[in-house]
Amino acid sequence: MALTSTHLRRAVSRVVAVLPALETELNEADSRLGDGDTGAMLARVVQAMDAAAPADGEEVGAALSAYAKATMGATGSSLGTLIATALMTISRQTKGREQVPWSELADLLAQARDAMSARGGASLGDKTVLDALDSVARALVGLDQPEGIQAAAQTAARATLEEFRDRPNKMGRARMFADASKGLDDPGMLAMVRIVEAIGR
């Protein structure tokens, strides 16, 4: 068994199913540190991706490229830009392939992490979505079965959210209120945790 465009489509559909609650939760989290619109932004992105759903048998790289373009069309936010960057990075690595071994997922996520860091300027430890993505990528090394990958990804993402909760934010608007951000979840990191959980259902 390997990752296909059908898996991607189903993953997006699972996130769509939890959007009402997710949008509210993320907006509330962001209202404590930023503009309070992370949930609304993510909802637009996910709905745009869902509308660009690939057909069965479509190349993985082509499907990811379509998702990236849908993301860029839905938002110009910093987090949206990072999502598009991640999708385009993995799209290039999977171009022309209808199936991608699950064992490659860790490396693909690591490449996405590095591209997002270069694009957005954040570093590991800054309390951003990068930290959650990094922990997931490292947790998946050596895994080649979807069930084990889902469990490891959820465990790693949740642990990172808890680990960083009492640390200060060092990027985005929240960095201007670093002390006030202690004890609060970073909205981008929280978004990734909830997406990983939704996909694993």
Image: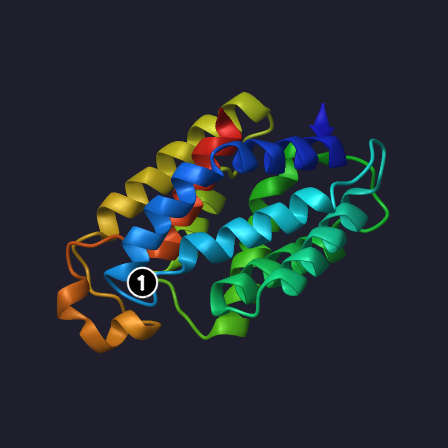
Across and down, in percent, residue 107 comes to 59, 48
- Give the residue drawn at x 29%, y 40%: 159
- Give the residue drawn at x 43%, y 33%: 197
- Give the residue drawn at x 82%, y 36%: 55
Relative to 38, is 107 on the left or the right? Answer: right
Relative to 50, is 167 on the left or the right? Answer: left
**What crowding class fits label 1: few (fewer than 14 Cα within 10 Å), some (14-19), or many (20 or more)?**
some
Relative to 159, is 50 on the left or the right? Answer: right
To which quarter of the image does residue 71 belong? bottom right
The residue singled out by tag 1 in the image is 125
Q: How is the image coloured?
A: rainbow
Above or below 119: residue 190? above
Q: Nearer the viewer, residue 201 or 98?
A: 201
Tell me the kind of residue under disc 1.
Gly
Q: Nearer the viewer, residue 87 or 23?
A: 23
Q: Would you say residue 135 is visible in this rendering?
A: no
Q: Would you say residue 22 is visible in this rendering?
A: yes
Secondary structure under tag 1 reads: loop
Q: Nearer the viewer, residue 75 or 153?
A: 75
Across and down, in percent, residue 171 comes to 33, 72
Above or below 107: residue 182? below
- Give the residue drawn at x 43%, y 31%: 152
Above or below 70: residue 180? below
Above or below 93: residue 119? below
